[in-house]
Amino acid sequence: MKYAFFPGCVSRGGCPELYPAAVKVCERLGLELEVMEGAACTGAGVLQEKNQLLGDALNARTFAMAEDMGLPIMTICSTCQGTMSQAHKRMADDPAYMAEINEVLAEEGLEYKGEVVVKHLLWILVEDLGLDTLKTFITTPLQGLRMAPFYGCYIIRPTGALGFDEHPEREDSLERVIETLGAESVEYAGKTRCCGFPILTINERNSVSMVANHTLEAKGLGADAMVTPCPLCHLNLDGFQPKAASMRKTSIDLPILHLPQVLGLAMGMDAKSMGLNKHIISAKKLLSSVALSA
């Protein structure tokens, strides 16, 4: 299986441990990646609020590049997935709008034909690779660990743009991957709520309060760690967890792991090579419980 790899900005910026972990895991799983050099940021939904045409044109440019490569797009960012899915749906629903965007792309000799497929690594594991196949790669089952899934807004809504009708398995895909790796998935209300990152710069107090709500809820239900397919969620839940603990005058100390990191651990990869020594909230205690070292 081969994919046009769209890693997104954050996996090589704010969360630089994510990119190499994803590449190593995909190589082990036999997922061939061709990095989309020169592809632009999706706009993360923020650009679209100011200028939808510009944001969608940037994504259509990426789609056209993937079509020229003859490959589906793989992303490792929930926000990228949602933003690209919404752009794709707007153009698919409005041929005149797509034609307007293609006029912009023509300046670069590109044309978006509307045939692109965009899939997060999470969905690829479930739909393309298959969980039974994934299980064959597990050498260090994460038995005894309780992990709380945290999806991130953009990979679960709006469901119409994200193909949930055609792929209902996406609704609980993260829980099923966690369980396939041998860990127990912790059920809690916050798993499908916003992490608070989108309002961080305009209302830090409320954003940090959301971090406290989700991490304390998960920990109160016995979670040893939280797993997210979204690096923006990771930035907030990991990076602002100390402030959240201070705000609530309590200890939280809940490691926040990227999806590829959890996959790598279950496949026996070295914790340091997965970048687990680079988080704000230390994962050493978690790793010791499965006989690993950061």
Image (tube, rainbow, N blue to C red):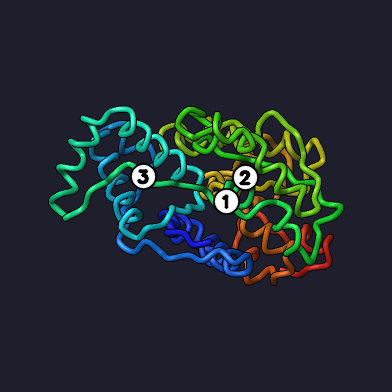
Q: In 3D space, how far apart are the residues under numbered discs 3 and 1 (Cα atoms)?
A: 18 Å
Q: Position of residue 280 (x, y in %)?
A: 61, 56
Q: Disc 1 designates what residue?
A: 124
Residue type, numbered disc 3: Glu
Horizontal side of residue 201 vs 97, given as left or right: right
Q: Disc 2 designates what residue?
A: 241
* Residue 284 showing in the rendered view: no
Residue visible at 53% across and 38% down? 155
Q: In 3D space, how far apart are the residues under numbered discs 3 and 2 (Cα atoms)?
A: 41 Å
Mark 1 packing: few (<14 Cα in 10 Å), some, or many (20+)? some
Horizontal side of residue 234 vs 141, given as left or right: left
* Residue 260 showing in the rendered view: yes
Residue visible at 45% across and 47% down? 118
Q: Nearer the viewer, residue 220 or 112?
A: 112
Q: Position of residue 95 (x, y in %)?
A: 25, 31
Mark sitting earlier along the chain (2/1): 1
Secondary structure of residue under mark 2: helix
Residue visible at 32% across and 51% down? 62
Residue visible at 64% across and 37% down? 169
Q: In 3D space, how far apart are the residues under numbered discs 2 and 1 (Cα atoms)?
A: 30 Å
Q: Nearer the viewer, residue 142 or 225?
A: 142
Q: Nearer the viewer, residue 289 or 91?
A: 91
Q: Position of residue 21 (x, y in %)?
A: 58, 65
Residue type, numbered disc 2: Gln
Mark 3 packing: few (<14 Cα in 10 Å), some, or many (20+)? some
Horizontal side of residue 17 vs 183, given as left or right: left
Q: Disc 3 designates what residue?
A: 115
Quick one: which residue is furthest to the right in this view?
144
Secondary structure of residue under mark 3: loop
